[in-house]
Image (cartoon, rainbow, N blue to C red):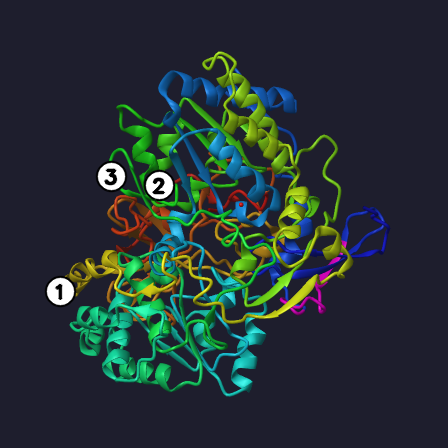
Amino acid sequence: MSTTAGRVRYTSCTLCEAMCGLEVTLAADGAVGSIRGHDGDPLSRGHLCPKAFALPELQDDPDRLRRPLVRGVDGELHETTWDAAITKAAELLGDVQIEHGDDALAIYLGNPNVHSLGALTHHPTLVRLLRTRNRFSATSVDQLPHHVVAWALYGHQFLLPVPDIDRTDLLVLVGHNPMASNGSLWTVPDFPQRRRELASRGGRLVVLDPRRTETARSADEHHFVRPGTDAFVLLALVREVLGSGRARPATWVDGVETVRAAVEPFTPELADTASGMPADAVRGLAAALLDAPSAAVHGRMGVSTQGAGVVCQWAVHVLNILTGNLDRPGGTMFATPAVDLVGRGLLGPGGFSRRKTRVRGLPGFGGELPVSALAEEMTTPGKGQVRALLTIAGNPVSSTPGGQHLDAAIAGLDAVVCIDFYLNETTRHADVVLPPSGPLERDHYDLVFHLLAVRDTARFSPALLPKDPGGRHDWEIARDLGAAYLAVRSRSLFGRWSRSALEAMARLRTSPTRQLDLLLRTGGAGLSVRKLRQAGPGGLDLGPLRPRLPERLATRDRRVDLAVPLVLDDLPRVLASAELQRDADTLLLVGRRHQRDNNSWLHNSALLTKGRARHALLAHPDDLAVRGITDGSTVRVRSAVGVVEVEVAASEDLMRGVVSLPHGYGHRRDEVRLRRATAVPGVSMNDLTDPSVTEPLSGNAVLNGVPVTLEPVLEPVLEPVLEPVHEATPTAPPA
C-alpha cells in the first residue's frame, strides 16, 4: 500500500464499539499527519471522539513493546527472537498441561479482541486448540446478563436488538451513558448529533441512573435510581403496561399471562421505596411507552453489573415486546450484517453447560466460566487447579473484581504467557510476552459490531501503515504458537495429531482477509473484499434496520416465550431484597466512564490525560458534610475486601447515598516501570469490588452498588506512588 506524503487514506477507528470512519492524511515521512472524521461514512457521518486523535500516539508510544520478551534466569524480562519466544511459550503451556492435565491452563481474553479482525478469526481457533475448559473473558465482567437473556428469549446469545435511534420517538436508557461510551452493545457513533435529531423531530430521551451522567444531562427527563434496585422499577413498568390493558405483543409471543401473575407484587409504590424513583414517575413512564408512536428501552452496564442483572435485562426486553416495539422501525431491531455470524452458525448459540467452576460451583455459559472465580481456581489446591495462564489482549488484574487478590494468585503460577504489547499489572508477571502489531498496521473489518449497529453498512479498511520490520500480527502469533504448541503436545501423543488439530492449523494458516473474503462471498449479499475496496472509502450503505422477526429467531418453534423459568424463579429473591436495610453509614459505590478513557486503556496517553484529573471519588455534598469531609480532601474508602485512599470531589450529579469511582487508575510505580508517566495518580474501583459476590443466575461480576464507608484521612499515610498504566490496548477480539 502506498504511503505517499500528503495522500489521504481512509480507515476505521478500532478503539471502541462505534466503528467511526476516519480520514487520515499521511505526512512526508509516511507517519500519520492528521486525522478527522470521514463525512462520507454512512454510519459515523463524520463523527469522531478524542480517542481517535490518540491513534498516532499509540502507534509511536515508547512504552509499546515491539519485540517479544522472555524472562531470564536473573528474573528479568529480556528481548529475544520470535522463534525463541514462541517456542518457550509453547513449552511452558504444553508442559504444564502434560504434567497436570489440560485444565491446568486458564485462558483470559480481554475486550480488545473484538476490535481486531485477526483476533476474531484466529484466537477462538487457538483457544480450542489448547483444549482447556478453563476459559474466561471480559464478558463475565460487564455483559453476560445480556447474552443469557438473548439466549433464553430468542435462542441465540448474540441476537441482541438495539434501539433504532434514527427513527424512534421515545428513547429510554437505563444505566447507560452513550455520550461517553459511543454506545455499548449498541454501535451508535455520533450519539450527540443523533440525540439532537431525536429532539428536532419532537422525540424525547429519558434516563434512569444514580448519577447525572453526560447522557442524563442531555435528557428531557432524568430519574435517580438507587444502585442495585433497577429491577424494581423495570418490573413495575412491566406490571403497569400489562395492567393498562394496552399491551400489544406480537402473535409469535407466548407466556404473557404467566408474566402478569409473576410481576404482580412489583408495584410502583414498592419501586419508589426500593429505588427512590417516585411511584407517579414510574406510572408516567409506563404510559409514555404505551402512548409513543415508537419507543425503545435499552439497559447497559448499570443494570448488567448488579445482583439482579439477568432479571433487569429480561424486563427491558419484555417492555419492548409488550409495547409492540420489538422489531419495528423506531423500536428495538436486529441488524442484517453482510457477514452474519449468527445466521451462519459461526458464533455459538450459548447456553448453560454442565461445567461449573471447581471451587465455588459458579455456572458456565457459552463455553466460558465467570472471571470472578479465576483467582480462587489458581490458589485452591486439588485436582484441576489452575497452574498456568494465557492472557490475550487483557489485563484482568486491573479490569476484574478484587484485582489485588488476582495479582497475588498470578504471581504464584508455574507459567504465564501474554499476547500483549504493553507491560501492565497482569503482563508484568509473564514468563513470555508476545506483542502484536498495532491497530493502524492491520487490515480491519468489524465482524461483531455490525451485529449491533444502528444502520446496516459494510466497510473494509486496509492497513494504514506497514507493521514494524520483524513484527507479527496477532493472527500470525496465533498461527505460530498453535504449531509450536502441537509440537510440544506431540511428545505425549506419540506424534499423532488429531483431525480436529489439523483442521485448526489449516484455519490458523489462512489470513484474516482471506477468511473475511470467503465469509463475504458466501454471505448472501454478493460481496467480497474486492467489492468493498471498490465501493469507496465509506464502504457500502446497506440501509436502515428492517424487521426480521419471527424468521430471525433461533428458537426451535420460531416463537418467543416471555415466561423464562430461570428468571421467574428468581423473582422471589429479588422481591425479598426490598426488605434489606442499609446501614446509615454505608454508601453505594458505582463506576464511571469518561469519553477520553477506554475502560482502563489509554491512561498513558499524554493527549488524552491532559487537563483536570478524572480519577477522583465523586460524592454528594450532603454525604460529605455529615461525615465531616471537605471537598478536595483525601478520604479513605473501605469495602468488604479492600481500602483505598483518594481525593474526593463534591458533586450534586450523584444521588445521595451514592459515590462514584472509575477503574484502571492507580498502578504502583514499583510494580510496572514506564519510561514516561503522563497520567495523574489515582486508585481503581476494582480494588474495592468483591469477587465473591456475583449475579446468581449468570455469575457476572457485581460492580454496581458495592457497599463502602468513607472517612477523612487526617494524617498522610506513606504509600508507594500511584500512577496509571494501560490495559492491553487494541490489538486484537470477547466472546
* Residue closest to the eye, 292 or 410: 292
| Label 3 to label 2: alpha-carbon separation | 10 Å
Q: Would you say the magenta stretch is mainly helix, strand or loop?
A: loop
Residue 436, position in %: x, y? 62, 36
The label nearer to you, 1 versus 3, is 3
The number of numbered discs placed on residues in the rendered structure image is 3
Q: CA distance from mark 2 to mark 1?
A: 31 Å
**Circle 2 crowding by C-alpha within 10 Å: few under 14, some 14–19, many from 20:** many
Q: Residues within 10 Å of mark 1 (few under 14, many from 20)?
A: few
Going from N to C along the chain, the mark reached first, 1 or 3, is: 3
Per the image, label 1 sits on a secondary structure element best described as: loop
Instruction: Provide residue 588's location: percent of width, then percent of height.
Output: 28, 60
Would you identify the image quadrant in which residue 106 lies?
top left
Name above or below for residue 427 compared with residue 629: above
Task: Identify the secondary structure beneath mark 2.
Answer: loop
Query: Which mark identifies residue 579?
Result: 1
Q: Is residue 36 left or right of residue 152?
A: right
Residue 670's disc number = none
Give the percent coordinates (x, y) of residue 171: 44, 76
The answer to whether 8 is drawn above or below residue 261 in the figure is above
Residue 245 on the magenta span? no
Q: Quadrant of residue 59?
A: top right
* Percent x, y of residue 490: 50, 16
Q: Which residue is mark 3?
A: 361
- From what the image shows, is residue 208 above or below residue 126? below
* Boundaries of the magenta span: 33-45
Q: Dot 2 corresponds to which residue? A: 369
User: Which of pointers 3 and 2 lies earlier in the amino acid sequence?
Assistant: 3
